[in-house]
């Protein structure tokens, strides 16, 4: 089977930052069958037209004036069931030892976590096209190396491409931006108690039927992997 995976990050430069108020780096991914992609895009565009959202939508733009659009977007995501799945990796900055394990290179560390996000959901005998939100890297070969690493450990699967895509060109990357940003905001407590973002987090938790928190490895719809550097899941 052919799968498309769309990815985005929240606080991608956290490992290099000394002054950030955030504690956690998150990388999110949205998984779907390739045959469903165009239908999903059409549905999202219909929601944009309904709510008159003409420009790029993202977590940073959540406001009371657009709250109903974001609620409809999240409801739509939920209604797709297992046809549309979210997987996030949550990384506690304080537990990352760049010097001993990542050659003191935060960019290398970041892409190692990207690998952990993707590798565990790549299944044998399937074909994967992976689209990452465009990010300016010090080394231009990061995505090529990520693809090679995924191919080497998934010998019975085909990782056809790992490519950068600008978010303003993809409503599916914009969707994963919203979902990843929402989960990141919950973990980092980066919202006001009466803010539209807090309202949206609460709405998402109603759909989950529990607070946003790390899940078991078997969770399929909204999988939140809080990495344990001693091994396993926290």
Image: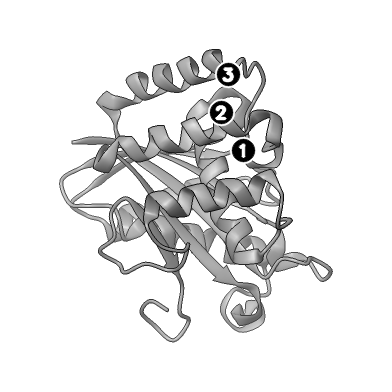
Q: Position of residue 177 (x, y in %)?
A: 57, 42
Which of the marked residues, 1 or 3, is nearer the chain's N terminus? Answer: 3
- Residue lying furthest right in this view? 19
Q: Quadrant of the N terminus?
A: top left
The circle on residue 134 is 1
In the image, 233: left or right of 146? left
Q: Mark 3 points at which residue?
A: 51
- Do the numbered discs 3 and 2 sit on residues whose CB atoms are within 8 Å? yes
In the image, 84: left or right of 12? left
Q: Quadrant of residue 155?
A: bottom left
Residue 27 in the image: above or below residue 30 = below
Residue 112 in the image: above or below residue 128 = below
In the depicted view, which residue is nearer to us: 200 or 53? 200
Which of the marked residues, 1 or 2, is nearer the chain's N terminus? Answer: 2
Alpha-carbon span between mark 1 and mark 3: 27 Å
Q: Nearer the viewer, mark 1 or mark 2?
A: 2
- Do the numbered discs 1 and 2 sit on residues whose CB atoms are within 8 Å? no
In the image, 61: left or right of 199? right
For label 2, the crowd category at 10 Å Cα-Cα, with few meaning under 14, some 14 to 19 and many 20 or more, is many
Alpha-carbon span between mark 1 and mark 2: 25 Å
What kind of element bears circle 3?
Answer: helix
Residue at 49% in and 51% down? 28
For label 1, the crowd category at 10 Å Cα-Cα, with few meaning under 14, some 14 to 19 and many 20 or more, is few
What kind of element bears circle 2?
Answer: helix
Residue at 41% in and 16% down? 42
Q: Where is residue 169 in the image (x, y as percent from the top left)?
A: 58, 23
- Residue lying furthest bottom in this view? 230
Q: Mark 2 points at which residue?
A: 69
């Amino acid at each position: 089977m052919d799968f498309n995976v769309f990815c985005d990050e929240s606080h991608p430069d956290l490992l290099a930052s000394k002054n950030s108020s955030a504690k956690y780096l998150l990388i999110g991914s949205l998984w779907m069958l390739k045959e469903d992609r165009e239908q999903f895009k059409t549905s999202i565009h219909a929601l944009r037209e309904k709510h008159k959202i003409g420009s790029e939508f993202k977590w940073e733009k959540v406001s009371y004036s657009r709250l109903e659009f974001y609620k409809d977007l999240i409801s739509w995501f939920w209604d797709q069931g297992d046809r549309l799945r979210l997987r996030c990796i949550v990384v506690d900055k304080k537990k990352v030892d760049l010097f001993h394990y990542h050659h003191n290179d935060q960019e290398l560390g970041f892409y190692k976590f990207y690998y952990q996000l993707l590798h565990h959901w790549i299944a044998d005998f399937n074909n994967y096209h992976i689209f990452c939100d465009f990010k300016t890297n010090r080394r231009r070969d990061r995505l090529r190396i990520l693809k090679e690493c995924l191919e080497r450990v998934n010998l019975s699967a085909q990782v056809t491409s790992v490519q950068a895509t600008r978010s303003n060109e993809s409503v599916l990357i914009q969707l994963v931006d919203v979902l990843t940003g929402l989960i990141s905001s919950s973990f980092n407590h980066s919202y006001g108690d009466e803010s539209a973002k807090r309202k949206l987090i609460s709405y998402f938790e109603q759909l989950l039927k529990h607070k946003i928190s790390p899940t078991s490895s078997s969770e399929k719809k909204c999988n939140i992997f809080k990495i344990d550097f001693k091994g396993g899941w926290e």
